[in-house]
Amino acid sequence: MVMKSTTTLYILLVLTFINSGLSMLSGILMAALLPQMEAIYAQGAISLPTEFSVVMENYFSIPRPYHLSVGIINALSLVGAILMWKLRPTGFHCYTIAQLLLLIIPVVFLGKGYLGIGNIMFTLLFVAAYYYLMRSLGAFSRTEEGVNDTENNDNTKQ
């Protein structure tokens, strides 16, 4: 059972590495390059169909701090995933906090209409799966050094 739990955990973590890593890069790059992209688009250097032009104009209206916040929070999520790979309970906590912030940030910057039920469901699914798998592997019964608190107390009594 432990081998199956470990494999499942690692599969989920690889998915998180991909998503959080790409989202981190995307957020940071968009925060850095958004003004240049908007200027190039405004100059008419890029010819787009009308439908796509509306999408681009809406995208340019998203403030730079939003993109930067998303990038930084995804970096926290990535750190959490790396720590969970090492079966550190703080990794789970970092990941969970980051995912909750990623649900809140669009609402703060863009409005209530950007709270998606799909995002909430995936967040709950992944957090619950990580909790279950980390718990089944005994990650929450260890200290950060990986020593069980009861084992530590037994050694000091001898």
Image (spheres, helix red, strand yellow):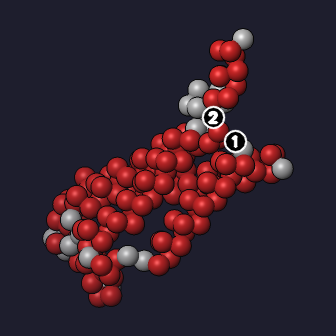
Circle 1 is placed at which residue position? Answer: 138
Instruction: Give yes or no for contact between labels 2 and 1 (Cβ–Cβ under 8 Å).
Output: yes
Q: What residue type is labelled 2?
A: Arg
Relative image position of residue 2 (x, y in whole percent): 80, 46
Secondary structure of residue under mark 1: loop
Circle 2 is placed at which residue position? Answer: 142
Farthest bottom residue?
Answer: 50
Circle 1 crowding by C-alpha within 10 Å: few under 14, some 14–19, many from 20: some
Q: Which amino acid does label 1 sit on?
A: Gly
How far apart are the two marked residues, 2 and 1, measured between alpha carbons? 7 Å
Relative image position of residue 107 (x, y in whole percent): 30, 71
Q: What residue is shown at x 54% (from left), y 66% (from top)?
A: 124
Secondary structure of residue under mark 2: loop
- Residue 101 sits above or below residue 4 on the image: below
Circle 2 crowding by C-alpha within 10 Å: few under 14, some 14–19, many from 20: some
Q: What residue is shown at x 61% (from left), y 54% (from top)?
A: 131
Q: Is residue 46 visible?
A: no
